[in-house]
Structures are given as structure tokens and as C-alpha cells.
Image (spheres, rainbow, N blue to C red):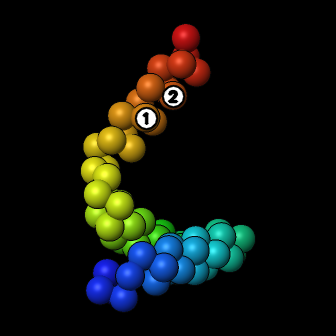
Amino acid sequence: MVKQGINKVIQKVGEEAVELVIEAKDDNEDLFKNEAADLLYHFLILLKVKNIKLENVEQILSLRSKKSRG
């Protein structure tokens, strides 16, 4: 997929996000977890294509958490 370019990666992230939202409204936990895994997988590919480490995103979340508590 990476070889197909960033547009394909972005498309997959969007598709998987929509599928996760659809599954979130239902009660099938297995399907929801599978869609969550698909979204996470494609999100991680997008980070790689953009040359951004997951740790960088985690740092931002940590800072936000500290601000909301403070």
C-alpha cells in the first residue's frame, strides 16, 4: 500500500475510521475490535509515511492530559 502513495494510505485510514464508527453503534464487540485494529494499523502506516514516530503523538497526548488536570 505504501508503494501506491500517500493518497492510498489516507484513503484507507478514512475507510477504516468510517467502518469503526459504524461498528461502534452495534453490539458486536469482536467486529468493533477488528475494525479498531484495522484503523490502528493503517494509522501507523500513515505515521510511517509521514516520518512521524508514534512516540511523538504520545508526547502530545501526555501534554494535553497534564494541561487538562492542571
According to the image, label 2 marks what residue?
A: 64
Q: Amino acid under label 2?
A: Arg
**Dot 1 crowding, Cα within 10 Å, few <14, some 14–19, many 20+:** few
- Helix, strand or loop at mark 2: helix
At 36% from the left edge and 88% from the top edge, which residue is drawn? 4
Q: Residue furthest top?
A: 70
- Quadrant (top left/top right/bottom left/bottom right) for the N terminus: bottom left
According to the image, label 1 marks what residue?
A: 60
Q: Is residue 68 above or below residue 23?
A: above
In this image, 63 relative to 22: left or right? Answer: left
- Helix, strand or loop at mark 1: helix
Determine whether label 2 and label 1 are within 8 Å by CB: yes
Q: Amino acid under label 1?
A: Ile
Residue 2 lies, in percent from the top left, at 31, 81
Residue 10 lies, in percent from the top left, at 50, 74
At 41% from the left edge and 30% from the top edge, which residue is drawn? 62
User: Is residue 4 visible to us here?
Assistant: yes
Front residue of this view, candidates 5 and 63: 5
At 48% from the left edge and 79% from the top edge, which residue is drawn? 7
Q: Is residue 67 above or below residue 17?
A: above
